[in-house]
């Protein structure tokens, strides 16, 4: 996977997380691949449902709901885990 693809994928995932978090997201904190969804962002169960829904909308060829448990324990889930999982399945990054 190329750096451009990784950057596009990161940008897409960041935008999805920003939409989900809304005003709960600290504007002084930058989302990075090392950002923990629970520890850093305070993700709740409904946030994960919204995340899966949005990821499936953007990356239509990913069966995310069927394989979420293969990624990592939810309490340890980081943005990089999402990117690795999406990339390993060859999902195409859509134009934003």
Image: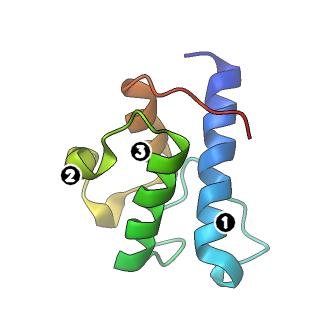
Residue at 55%, 58% in the rendered image: 35
Quadrant where the image shows the C terminus: top right
Pointer 3 residue: 81
Can the viewer see residue 8 in this picture? Answer: yes
Could you tell me which quadrant the N terminus lies in? top right
Where residue 70 sits in the image (x, y, percent)? 21, 44
Do residues under tags 1 and 2 come within 8 Å of each other at their CB atoms? no
Q: Position of residue 69 (x, y in %)?
A: 20, 52
Colour scheme in the image? rainbow
- Residue for point 57% across, 47% down: 33
Which residue reaches farthest right? 28
SS of the residue at dot 1?
helix
Among the 4 quarters of the image, the one containing residue 84: top left
Q: Give the foreground label among 1 and 3.
A: 1
The numbered disc on residue 18 is: 1
Q: CA distance from mark 1 to mark 2?
A: 23 Å
Instruction: Residue 47 in the image: state x and y as whole percent.
Output: 45, 73
User: Label 1 vs label 3: CA separation?
Assistant: 17 Å
Does residue 61 sit above or below 74 in this rendering?
Answer: above
Give the camera-side residue of 8 and 94. Answer: 94
């Amino acid at each position: 996977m190329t750096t451009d693809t990784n950057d596009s994928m990161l940008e897409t995932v960041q935008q999805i997380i920003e939409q989900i978090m809304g005003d709960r997201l600290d504007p002084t904190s930058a989302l990075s691949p090392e950002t923990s969804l629970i520890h850093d962002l305070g993700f709740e169960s409904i946030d994960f449902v919204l995340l899966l829904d949005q990821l499936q909308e953007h990356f239509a060829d990913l069966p995310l709901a069927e394989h979420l448990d293969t990624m990592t324990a939810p309490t340890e889930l980081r943005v990089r885990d999402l990117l690795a999982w999406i990339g390993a399945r060859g999902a195409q990054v859509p134009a934003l």
